[in-house]
Amino acid sequence: MSNAMSPHTLPIDLPDDFAQTASASHSVKSDMPPPPDVEPIDPQDAHHMERPMPPKGPIDTIIAVIHFASRVCGVLSATMFAVAMLIICQLVFMRYVLNDSTVWQTEAVIFLMIGATLVGLPYVQLIRGHVNVDLLPLYLKSGARMALAIVTLLSGMAISALFGFYGFELVIEAFDGGWLTETIWAVPLWKPFSALPIGFGLLFMQFLADFLALITRRSTPFDLRDDAF
């Protein structure tokens, strides 16, 4: 007996309507439509995507420059943290391996850590890395949410401008008075104090960029969709 299967012979595990179809891709009948080639778009997302973008202009240039400065601050802050970590390693090696005294390492680490925190403020605001509780904005309507965002940004600008102004005054006073640290290293204090006006001054500029983007509809309040909640 030959085991060759006749062209008209069907395997037992195939459906009966296999021979009635034109191609193997439609071999099984189903009441369900075939899956789409692309994932359907949520109507809410489509509405959000169709939102008209404002025309390009000088405001976009201002915002781009401020964002670039904030990213530079982020790189500088990360570099200062890395340098502080290397100095700590050198301090441990000098003190516990070579049994040698340290003079400048502890003070340098303290100033680098504080300076990195202050200089990194605008970058953290750029990436929305600060602590943010958006429960109240979620429950507000679009108009009230916009008003709250404007008040929040104006308050941020006022606080950062205040700290930046008095920080600049502190730098001038330390420079004119010749203030030095009471250590063997005797660092001029105006140098570490300069992180105050630099950090808060650039934080003010980042708040200003966020404010300009908000009032010109280039961004949404608290980065929430208009139809959120």
Image: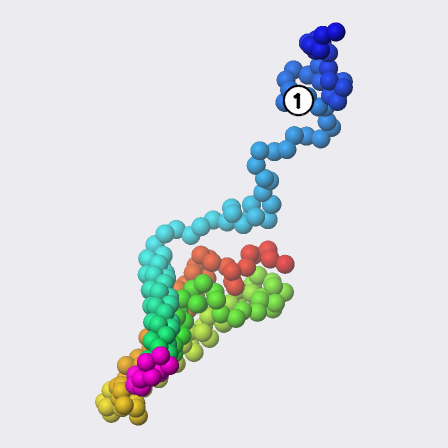
Seen in the picture, residue 176 relative to 66 is either above or below; the reply is below
Residue kind at label 1, given as amino acid type: His
Residue denoted by label 1: 26
The residue closer to the viewer here, 227 or 104, is 104
Q: Which of the image's four quarters has the N terminus? A: top right
Is 97 a magenta residue? yes
> Up-down: is 94 above or below 49?
below
Q: How many marks?
A: 1
What segment carries the magenta color? 95-110
Q: Residue at x 23, y 90 (%)?
A: 178
Q: Residues within 10 Å of mark 1 (few under 14, many from 20)?
A: few
Q: How is the image coloured?
A: rainbow
Q: Secondary structure at mark 1?
A: helix
Q: Residue at x 52, y 63 (%)?
A: 222
- Closest to the observer, 174 or 214: 174
Query: Looking at the picture, does residue 169 appear above or below residue 214?
Result: below
Instruction: Give above or below for 108 relative to 11.
Output: below
Query: Is residue 142 in the magenta section?
Result: no
In the picture, measured across the screen, residue 145 lies left or right of residue 177, that is right
Percent position (x, y) of residue 96? Answer: 37, 81
Q: Foreground: 179 or 65? A: 179
Q: Is residue 203 among the parts visible in the rendering?
A: no
Q: Residue at x 63, y 58 (%)?
A: 229
Q: Quadrant of residue 194?
A: bottom left
Image quadrant of residue 205? bottom left
User: Do we see residue 190 in this rendering?
Assistant: yes
Q: Position of residue 151 (x, y in %)?
A: 49, 72
* 69 relative position to 225: left or right: left
Foreground: 141 or 13?
Answer: 13
What residue is rendered at 65% in x and 15% in y?
22
x%, y% of residue 132? 54, 69
